[in-house]
Amino acid sequence: MTGGFVGFAVRRILAAVPTLFGVTLIVFFMVRMLPGDPARLLAGLNATEDEVSRIRVQLGLTRPVAVQYEIFIANLVHGNLGRSVVTQAPVSYEIGTRLPATALLAATATVISVVMGVASGIVVSTRQYTATDYLVTVLALAGISIPVFWGGLMLMVVFSVGLHLLPAGGDSGPSSLILPSVALSAFALATIERQTRSSMLETLHQDYIRTARAKGLGGRIVVYRHALRNALIPVITVAGLQSATLLGGAILTERTFSWPGIGTLLVNAIQARDYPIIQGVVLLFAVTFLVVNLVVDILYGYIDPRIRYG
C-alpha cells in the first residue's frame, strides 16, 4: 500500500513539471502584454529619447522575446527574480518584506473558513430543513455573492465607524487582522460549508450508515466516526483549492484595508509598470496555487486508495 501511494505521489509530482513550465510561459508573456511603454512611463514625460533608450536596455526590452524568456528562466533557476525598476532593490527582497503579512492574512482566513465551514456544514446536515438549515443557507449564499471589497467596506462601516471596536485599516496590532481576515474568508467559508453539507447529507443516506444506526450506535458516533471521514474527502479538495484562492483574493482585501502585503505591492507595481516585481508576484501566486493543488491531489490519493490508478 505504501509503495503504491509513493508511486502515485511521484507520478503527480512529475506531471506538475510541465504545468510549472507553462506557468512561467504565461506569466512572462502576460506581463509583456500590459498596455503602455514601461520605459517611457518610468522615464517620465519630459525624458529624452536617450534616457528612454537607456531604461529600455536596462529592462532588457531591446532583445528578442525568445532571448528575454531564456534569460528569465535561467535567472529563475538561480533564484534571481531581477531588480525592481522603481526601487532598484532585488525583487526577492521586495517580496520577502511583504510576504509575512500576506501569509498571516491568508493563513488566518484559511483557518476561519475551514473550521467554521466544516463545523457549520456538519451542524446543518444533521438539521436538514430546519430554521437553522435555512438561516445558514442564506448566510452562505450571501458570503458567495458579496464581493470581498464590498464586504470589507461594510465591516469597516459597522465595526470601525459605527461601533469603534476595531481598526479600519493598516497593521497596528492583532486587532487590525480581524476585519480583513473575516472579509477574505467569507467566500471560502460559504463554499466549504455548502460542500460539507452536501457531502454529509449524501453520506448519511448510505446503507452502512443506516446499518450502524440499526445496531444502536449513538447519533454522534454515527456522524463523527462513520460519516465524517468519508464525507470529508471532497471537502478536502474544495478546502485546498479555496485556500490557494485566498492568496489571490488577498489583493483586493489588502487594498481595501491598507494591509501592507504582497497584494499592495503588486498593485503599485502594475501602476508603475515595474515588470520584474509584477513577474515575481504573479509567479509566486501561480506556483503557490500549483503546489497547493498538488498537495491536495496527493492527500486525496492517500485518503482514498481507489484513485491510485496506473
Image (cartoon, rainbow, N blue to C red):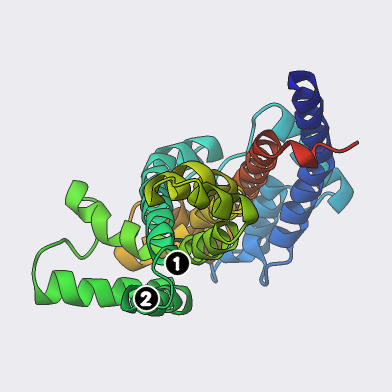
Residue 180 drawn above or below residue 97: below
Residue 43 coordinates in the image, percent (x, y): 56, 61
For badge 2, the amino acid type reads: Leu
Q: Answer with left or right where residue 271 lies relative to residue 32.
A: left
| Visible residue check, residue 170 | no
Q: Answer with left or right where residue 227 lies relative to residue 297.
A: left
For the point 47% across and 74% down, the residue is 144
Residue 228 coordinates in the image, percent (x, y): 50, 48
Residue 219 coordinates in the image, percent (x, y): 40, 52
Badge 2 or badge 1: first in the primary sequence: 2
Asked if the residue at tag 1 contacts the one at tag 2, i.e. Cβ–Cβ closer than 8 Å, the answer is: yes
- Number of residues whose C-alpha sits closer than 10 Å to that of mark 2, classed few (under 14), some (14–19) or many (20 or more): few
Q: Secondary structure at mark 2?
A: helix
Residue at numbered disc 1 = 190
Residue 253 drawn above or below residue 299: below
Q: Which is nearer the eye, 264 or 102? A: 102
Q: Which is nearer the eye, 149 or 56? A: 149
The residues bearing labels 2 and 1 have C-alpha atoms spaced at a distance of 8 Å
For the point 53% across and 47% down, the residue is 212
Q: Answer with left or right where residue 295 lies relative to residue 184.
A: right
Q: Which is nearer the eye, 21 or 219? A: 219
Residue 141 drawn above or below residue 188: below
**Residue at the farthest left position:** 164
Residue at numbered disc 2 = 139
Q: Which is nearer the eye, 51 or 29? A: 29
For the point 45% across and 58% down, the residue is 250
| Visible residue check, residue 234 | yes
For the point 42% across and 58% down, the residue is 122
